[in-house]
């Protein structure tokens, strides 16, 4: 594949989960967890996917990883359609795409030492490696993620959350993947540890030329690591832009509200916070037209009409809002995370 | 930055076993009942193994003149039965049979139950539902009648009774294992293993099984107790181990006619059964407290 085709392409991915009422209930309703996502992740870039809980971020991530088959739509990895890949091809793809999990306490097998955990991917993708060679690689990778190589014989319960997350990252990197899906990798960690883990991600991404999908609900985290940001709401992408662009000139009212919700140390900024009313609507029965209109400060009658498509405001910056007359508040200087 | 806290614990944790943490062992040792059970069952097993060699009379040695001797007369420690056979020798030989049948039935039923539970819990959906409904339907039969029916059709022998007991006692372990697996398989480390390219059997036996060794050991221990009891009452009803080979159950069967004249004939094997069964139950309780997964896993 040529170098400028995106590593990951998704075309109109939908993931609907049927709801059953009772034992013999017909599945007439369904939860539209992901409702039509078309997005490209260029090689060696990091796409941050932001959204509140229930917006379908993780469901989308699992579909991209090939863990769940989407209801409809196409996922291409390096130009190859995942749904059409043969068993052998899929095995090759599995090596190239790896995942880091949200909960460092459930992502490591409590009965396996670090050495064994890190050796699992090698067992299946580098079968000719001897036990000793696997151990060497595990120790090497541990150092790479900032843990002493001597820790290879320890068990998960001997580590802190941040250390476990580093082990999780090491496991994903054991087979030198091209793509890493990181699902809420820092949300279970203390703020101070979050920064360390994010820095580790940033430096590994640079050194190993990784392409990443970084899923989080925290805009500050996204600002830290990603090149592009996609904002998700109720199974759809409402805004997609380069990171700096999104923070400095948001084009969708939902993005504006998210940016204003980020905590700031300045008292005077708090007055300007936009507080959204109510909860995210049900994905079983989403509002007609724009899914965000029920909570939007700028909604018009026209918003209830059709589902707004992503339109390009200027090159690279897309929004799914029909109003182009809005001037939305950007993130203030200290909130734009340049740290 | 994060090393300080761990350097302290390095020394104490270095010797830790693979799946049985030293904490678990310590909890078991401090469980008085469990240790009592372990000592009692060890004593019983030891007596059954070496006892028959130390006694002057064999278990089949008939001595009509010495019949119905109460315990403690001459060199008959536990007295004699209606044919003048040494009750102690018979008790120990019967113990061998009962314990071996109990342990063998436990091993078999644990194997069957673990595999069925593992497959059912891991695959869920159709395979899981079919296997677990099958388990439930086997569970619906009253065990004793199933045993008696099977025993009536098949030639009773120690091997046969072991197989029959195993075939009617694997369901509980299957249900425990399947329930544990169903919650474990949702954990992220299983997904991680899948992404790493692991096969289903690898995930089942290498990732999941080591995590449920605790509950399996507990259930298996309690199964020994129940298998001994089951063997005893099947033999008591005459469908189990056949005389002249003694088992604790058929010794009781013999004894019932002489309850008022020679009560020791019933008391001796009765006490033996009670000791063996309660010991295994105590050990099971102790193991349950010691290996409780909740206190061990993060």
Image: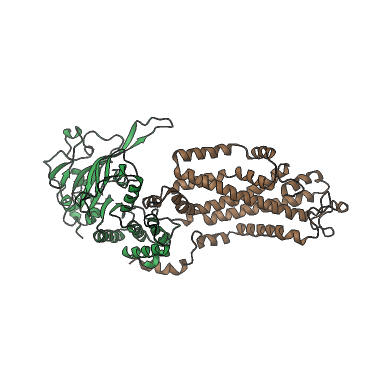
Residue A108 drawn at (x, y percent): 40, 56
The quarter of the picture where the C terminus of chain B appears is bottom left
Residue A242 seen: yes
Q: Colour of chain B?
A: brown
Closest to the observer, A239 or B147: B147
Closest to the observer, B119 or A87: A87
* Horizontal arrangement in the rendering, residue B159 relative to residue A5 (left or right): right
Residue B42 drawn at (x, y percent): 66, 59
**Residue at screen point 29% across, 43% down:** A56
Residue B260 drawn at (x, y percent): 82, 46
Residue B172 drawn at (x, y percent): 56, 44
**Residue at screen point 46% across, 54% down:** B206
The quarter of the picture where the N terminus of chain B appears is bottom left
Q: Colour of chain A?
A: green
| Above/below status of B173 relative to A161 | above
Closest to the observer, B78 or B98: B98
**Residue at screen point 72% across, 49% down:** B248
Figure coloring: by chain
Q: Please count the marks in the image.
A: 0
* Horizontal arrangement in the rendering, residue A280 relative to residue A338 (left or right): right
Residue A275 seen: no
Quarter of the figure with residue A120? bottom left
């Amino acid at each position: 594949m040529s170098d400028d085709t995106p590593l990951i392409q998704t075309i109109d991915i939908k993931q609907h989960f049927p709801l059953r009422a009772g034992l013999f209930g017909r599945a007439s309703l369904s939860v539209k967890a992901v409702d039509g996502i078309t997005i490209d992740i260029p090689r060696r870039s990091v796409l941050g996917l932001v959204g509140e809980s229930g917006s379908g971020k993780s469901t989308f991530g699992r579909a991209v990883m090939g863990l769940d088959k989407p209801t409809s739509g196409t996922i291409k990895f390096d130009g190859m359609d995942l749904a059409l890949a043969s068993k052998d091809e899929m095995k090759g793809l599995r090596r190239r795409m790896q995942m880091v999990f949200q909960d460092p306490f459930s992502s490591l097998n409590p009965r396996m030492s670090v050495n064994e955990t890190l050796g699992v991917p090698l067992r299946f993708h580098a079968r000719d490696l001897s036990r000793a060679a696997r151990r060497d690689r595990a120790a090497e990778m541990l150092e790479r993620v900032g843990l002493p190589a001597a820790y290879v014989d320890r068990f998960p319960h001997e580590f802190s959350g941040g250390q476990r997350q580093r082990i999780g990252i090491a496991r994903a990197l054991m087979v030198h993947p091209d793509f890493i899906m990181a699902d809420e990798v820092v949300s279970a960690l203390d703020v101070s540890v979050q920064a360390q883990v994010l820095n580790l991600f940033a430096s590994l991404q640079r050194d190993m030329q990784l392409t990443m999908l970084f899923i989080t609900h925290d805009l500050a985290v996204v600002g830290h690591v990603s090149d592009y940001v996609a904002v998700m709401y109720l199974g759809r992408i409402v805004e997609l832009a380069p990171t700096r662009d999104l923070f400095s000139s948001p084009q969708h009212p939902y993005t504006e509200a998210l940016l204003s919700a980020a905590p700031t140390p300045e008292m005077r900024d708090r007055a300007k916070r936009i507080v959204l009313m109510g909860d995210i609507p049900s994905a079983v029965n989403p509002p007609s037209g724009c899914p965000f209109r029920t909570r939007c400060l700028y909604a018009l009658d026209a918003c209830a009409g059709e589902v707004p498509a992503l339109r390009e405001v200027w090159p690279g910056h897309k929004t799914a809002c029909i109003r182009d007359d809005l001037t939305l508040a950007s993130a203030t200087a200290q909130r734009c995370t340049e740290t | 930055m994060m090393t300080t806290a761990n350097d302290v614990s390095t020394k104490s944790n270095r010797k830790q076993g693979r799946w049985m943490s030293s904490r678990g062992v310590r909890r078991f040792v401090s469980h008085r009942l469990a240790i009592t059970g372990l000592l009692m069952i060890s004593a019983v097993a030891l007596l059954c193994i070496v006892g028959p060699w130390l006694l002057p009379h064999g278990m089949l040695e008939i001595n009509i003149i010495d019949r119905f001797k109460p315990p403690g007369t001459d060199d008959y420690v536990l007295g004699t039965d209606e044919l003048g056979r040494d009750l102690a020798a018979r008790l120990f030989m019967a113990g061998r049979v009962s314990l071996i049948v109990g342990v063998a039935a436990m091993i078999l039923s644990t194997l069957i139950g673990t595999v069925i539970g593992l497959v059912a819990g891991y695959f869920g959906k159709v395979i899981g539902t079919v296997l677990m409904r099958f388990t439930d339907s086997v569970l619906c039969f009253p065990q004793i009648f199933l045993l008696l029916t099977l025993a009536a059709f098949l030639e009773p022998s120690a091997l046969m009774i072991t197989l029959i007991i195993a075939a009617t006692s694997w369901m509980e372990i299957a249900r425990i294992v399947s329930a544990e697996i169903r919650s474990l398989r949702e954990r992220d480390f299983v997904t991680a293993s899948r992404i790493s390219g692991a096969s289903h059997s690898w995930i089942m036996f290498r990732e999941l099984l080591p995590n449920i060794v605790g509950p399996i050991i507990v259930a298996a221990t309690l199964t020994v107790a129940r298998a001994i009891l089951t063997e005893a009452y099947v033999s008591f009803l005459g469908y189990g181990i056949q005389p002249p080979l003694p088992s604790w159950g058929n010794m009781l069967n013999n004894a019932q006619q002489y309850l008022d004249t020679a009560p020791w004939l019933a008391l001796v094997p009765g006490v033996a059964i009670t000791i063996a069964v309660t010991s295994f139950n105590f050990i099971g309780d102790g193991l349950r407290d010691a290996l409780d997964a909740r206190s061990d896993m993060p």
